[in-house]
Amino acid sequence: MPSTGERFERAVEIMERLRAPGGCPWDREQTFDSIKPYTLEETYEVLEAIDNRDWEELPGELGDLLLQVLFYSEMAKEQGNFSIDDVLDGLSRKLVDRHPHVFGDVKAETSADVKRNWEALKVEERKRRAQETTESSQNGNRQSATASNSILSGISTSMPAMLEARKLSSRAAQIGFDWPNIGGLFEKLDEEVAELHRHLQEFPAPGPRREGRGVAGSGRPAISEDLRERLEEEVGDLFFVLVNIARYLSLDPESALRKTNRKFRRRFQWIEQRLLAQGMTPERTPMKELESLWQQAKQQEKPA
């Protein structure tokens, strides 16, 4: 029976073979940029399997995600930048450094203690990186150095917006820039809703219309670019406050919305099946009947 290390080495060797002369033409053509969409896709498929508690599917999805790591590492090795060994060494160092209560003398009796230690270590890491950046940028771009010294540095702008919002607000909260309690967040939510209502007063008559049947957005009144941007800003502010409410409740907003999406999909498809059995379609069904079916879909999901 091969060991875990031997299995990992075999996967690395297979990836090397695919990228080598005489290997797979498709794999040899890939670049860091061309692989990025697959990395995102595989990540979401892992999350899908976890949400579904599909333990048979999850190992395969995790394997697909690991393939992305091997792919990037092999391409970097070919360019002389780094290798999978550097990735593993860096990971091991980080795990040891961030768990001094396991590998050192720091005490942590509870998960809350661990989290406090973790946050303190990350603050020290950022300070160290900021110092290194300042020293190397003394004759360089001052604005770039300032951005690198920011407490928000290192938070990717490429991640999903909800995750980025949560990380930004969590990082700012570490220095006390936060609502004192969840009541303040609900006050902020009311304030943002009021601001959105105020901008909507400028909306051309007869006002915003729901998407009708047919081409999405057809028949809607045209609005100025200025108003559109202000409405977009206010809706964005609403999302940001909701993300912070989720943070206060120790909930993942991305996961919460994903589960709501699946709930909507499940209920709407139940409606479609009921209508299909009657020889009908949603497009030809009155809204009143659709709403009645929606309530039935909700009821049939409730435990007996």
Image (spheres, rainbow, N blue to C red):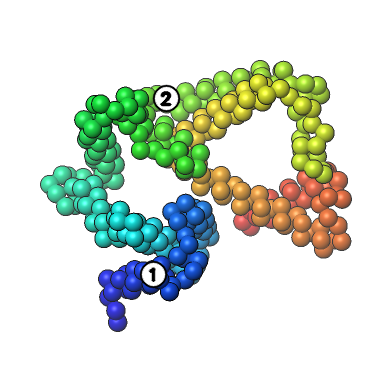
Is 17 above or below relative to 100? below
Q: How far apart are the two marked residues, 1 and 2, measured between alpha carbons? A: 55 Å
Residue located farthest toward the front when viewing the structure as drawn: 21
The answer to which of marks 1 and 2 sits earlier in the sequence is: 1
Horizontal and vertical percent for residue 103?
16, 52
Q: Which residue does the image show at 55% across and 33% down from the upper left?
A: 239
Is 290 above or below relative to 65? above
Q: Is residue 52 left or right of residue 208?
A: left
Q: Is residue 303 left or right of residue 48?
A: right
Closer to the camera in the image, 48 or 107: 48
Residue 179 marker? 2
Q: Which residue does the image show at 29% across and 28% down from the upper left?
A: 140
- Residue count near mark 2 (Cα–Cα under 10 Å), binned few <14, some 14–19, many ≥20: few
Q: Which residue does the image show at 62% across and 25% down from the upper left?
A: 229
Q: Is residue 285 in view?
A: yes
Closer to the camera in the image, 278 or 195: 195
Is 141 above or below relative to 60? above
Residue 20 marker? 1
- Given the image, on which type of amino acid does mark 2 rest? Trp
Horizontal and vertical percent for residue 282?
81, 52
